[in-house]
Structure formats: structure tokens, C-alpha cells
Amino acid sequence: DTEVTQTPKHLVMGMTNKKSLKCEQHMGHRAMYWYKQKAKKPPELMFVYSYEKLSINESVPSRFSPECPNSSLLNLHLHALQPEDSALYLCASSQSSLIFTEAFFGQGTRLTVV
Amino acid sequence: EDQVTQSPEALRLQEGESSSLNCSYTVSGLRGLFWYRQDPGKGPEFLFTLYSAGEEKEKERLKATLTKKESFLHITAPKPEDSATYLCAVRIQGAQKLVFGQGTRLTINP
């Protein structure tokens, strides 16, 4: 099983709202990632968690706040977003960020900020 | 600077017309090259992993190859359901970062 589950699939939020995106995997992977993808562009790395610790933050604005409660779960907390933050948000996991294996992606959350 | 470049940006083929997609890279120490397929509005679907020059992987109508500077995704006798964006990605920075090329949008006409 190579499934990464993301919820919700679609989200519409106002600029003053607080919402969270959730990601779950049960493959025993110890690296988890958040990516942002705009239309007709490749996925762009936002955060990397390795063994539940944040290891890479690609200078993402503080209105995006990641959290890794345990090795199977990854959240992305959203607050005071801007319309330009509307995008497909992808979660991925891999065996470890220290070995060179493939990452598996969820189906994404389509976020619209109004 | 680490860079991944895919070509062409878009490719239209007739059903059954074989072709190749290219992914060239300039990275300081390749830690794996990966091919993904992405359908509109969906997450990337993993296809292949390649680690060393000369390596080849096959799956149905797709075959991926790797040299020291580039990778090719060969598609043989494609069908309309092969239409998608094909992304290549490389691991850099001690393998923690997975960085994508711009992708090739492939359309197979019946």
C-alpha cells in the first residue's frame, strides 16, 4: 500500500479564517513533505519533516504553520491567507529523508482563498 | 546551482506514435532521479526511480533511462490514456529536498 491520504479535497476560506489541512500515511515512512502547486507549474517544496522534526522550511510565510503530531500525521495550519495562496497543496512521504528513495504523494487539497 | 530542465514543454502525438521526453540535470551529486505522472487536479503518481548511469526501468508502454547528464522517458505506441503531465525530480541537499523539473504535458490524440 502506497497511499497518502489528504483531507479535505477542496477548501474555500476567507482571508480572516483559520483552517487546517491534514495528511496521513501508514507506510512507516519517517519523512513527510508539504508542497504547493500552482496551475501549470511543478510542485514547489514548502516544508520537510524528518523523524517528526522540521528539517527544512523553504522561507515560507508564517501564515503557513506545519505540525507533525506523530510519524503518521502531518498538518498544515492556515491563517490570514491571501488570494495568491490559492493552489493545490500536496503532501508526500518517503521512507526517510536520509536515504534516496521515491516519495509518494496524496491527491492534494484544492485551496481557494476568497 | 542545482537545476532540472525538461523538454519539450508540451508534446502532441497520434495514438501509436512513439516518442521520448527528456530530463536534463546539473546537480552536485545525484541522489536519485524520479519520474512521476500527474493528471489534472491530482497528485503526482510515482513511476520510476533511477540511481546510476546506464540504469533502465520499464512499465507497460513506458521505459526510463539514465545517463550522467540526462534521463529519457520513452513511450512506445501510446494510447489516449497516457495523456498527462510527466514530471522528473531529483534529490539534492543530502537527499532531503526533492526538486522537480517544469514537466512535459503529453497529449495523445486518438
Image (tube, coloured by chain):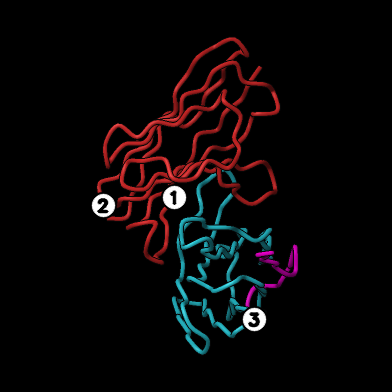
Chain colours: A red, B cyan
Point out residue B83 in the picture as x, y percentages from the top left corner. Answer: 61, 61
**Horizontal placement of A82 versus B56: left or right?**
right
Circle 1: is it few (<14), some (14-19), or many (20+) Cα within 10 Å? many
Q: Which label belongs to residue B69?
A: 3
Residue B107 visible from this viewpoint: no
Point out residue A73 in the picture as x, y percentages from the top left corner. Answer: 31, 36
Q: Secondary structure at mark 2?
A: loop
| Residue type for callout 2 | Met
- What residue is shown with label 1? A105
Q: Quadrant of the N terminus of chain B?
A: bottom right
Circle 2: is it few (<14), some (14-19), or many (20+) Cα within 10 Å? some
Q: Which label belongs to residue B95?
A: none
In the rendered structure, which disc, 2 or 1, sits on the residue that comes first in sequence? 2
Q: Secondary structure at mark 1?
A: strand
**Horizontal placement of A99 versus B89: left or right?**
left
Q: Which residues are magenta?
A: B1-17
Q: Residue at x 61, y 38 (%)?
A: A59
**Chain letter of the residue beneath label 3 in the structure image:** B
Q: Residue at x 53, y 63 (%)?
A: B92
Q: In the image, is residue A75 above or below residue A101?
A: above
